[in-house]
Amino acid sequence: MQTLSINFTQFFEQFPIVFSSLNDGFVQTLKLFFITLVGALPLGLLIAFGTTSKFKPLSAVMKVIVWIVRGTPLMIQLLIIFYFPGLVFGNNIWGGGETGRFWAACVAFVFNYSCYFSEIYRGGIQSIPFGQHEAGLVLGLSSSQIFFKVKLKQMIKRILPPISNEIITLVKDTSLARIIALQEVIWAGQSFMKGSNGIAGQIWPLFFTGVYYLVFSGILTLLFGYLEKRLSYFKV
C-alpha cells in the first residue's frame, strides 16, 4: 500500500510536466497534418489531371511517379528527402534544427499523400458517365463548366469515403516523422522512457499519446459522417 501511494504521488507530480510536453508534441503533429492536407489535396487533383491527360508522355511520367511513391514506404521517402541533399550534393538544404526537420517532413508527406489522393480523384472523375460530358457540350457548356457545374458534386460524393479514410490514416502516419527526429507527440511520450525534464524510466506517458490520436481520429470520423449525411440528398 505504501509503494502504491508513492507511485500515485509520483504520477500526480509528473503529470503536469508530461501533459505540457505531450501538448507541445501534438501541436507539431497538428501542424504537419494540416499543412499536408492544404498541400496534398490540390496537388493530388493536378496529378490526377496529369495521369488522365491525353498527352501520352505527360500521363506516362505522372503514372510512373505515382507508382513509385505508392509502391515505396513513406519512411524511406522521409529519409531520402531529408538526408539526400546533404549526403549526395553536400548541401543540407533543411539545416539541422527542428524547423528544417519539420519542413522536410511536410514536403515528404505532401508528395506522398498527393499521389494517393490523385488516384482517388482519378477514380472519382472516371466514374462519372461520359454521356454527361457530351450532354453538357450539346448545351453549350465548356469543359471546365461541365467539370465544376456537373461532375464536381457527383465526384465529391463518390470520393468522400476513401478520402476520409486516407485523412484518418494521415493522422497516424504523422508519427513516422520521428524517423528524422521530428519531435511530434510520440517522440515526446517516448522521451520520458529515456530521460526528459527530470523524468526517466516511465512508459505511461507513451500510452497517453494514443489518447491524442483516438480523440483526433474520433473528431474527424464525426466530421466526415456529418459531411456524408449533408451529401446524402445527392444520389449517385
Image (spheres, rainbow, N blue to C red):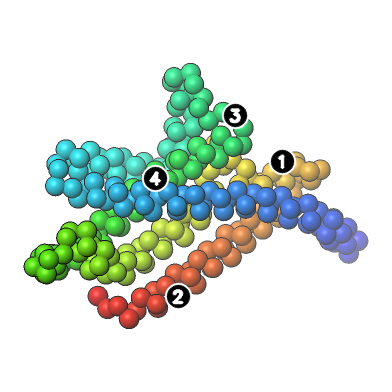
Q: Earlier in the sequence, mark 2 or mark 1?
A: 1
* Residue closest to the eye, 183 or 9: 183
Front disc: 4 or 1: 4
Contact, mark 2 vs mark 3 (Cβ under 8 Å): no
Q: CA distance from mark 2 to mark 3?
A: 42 Å
Q: Amino acid at mark 2?
A: Tyr
Contact, mark 4 vs mark 1 (Cβ under 8 Å): no
Q: Earlier in the sequence, mark 2 or mark 3?
A: 3
Q: CA distance from mark 1 to mark 3?
A: 22 Å
Contact, mark 4 vs mark 2 (Cβ under 8 Å): no
Query: Is the C terminus in the top left, top right, bottom left or bottom right quadrant?
Result: bottom left
Q: Find residue 112 and name its label.
A: 4
Dot 1 falls on a residue whose secondary structure is: helix
Q: Earlier in the sequence, mark 4 or mark 3?
A: 3
Which residue was labeled with disc 2?
226
Q: Is residue 232 above or below residue 166?
A: below
Q: Is residue 55 above or below residue 160?
A: above
Which residue was labeled with disc 3?
96
Residue 72 image offset from top left, x and y in percent: 36, 41
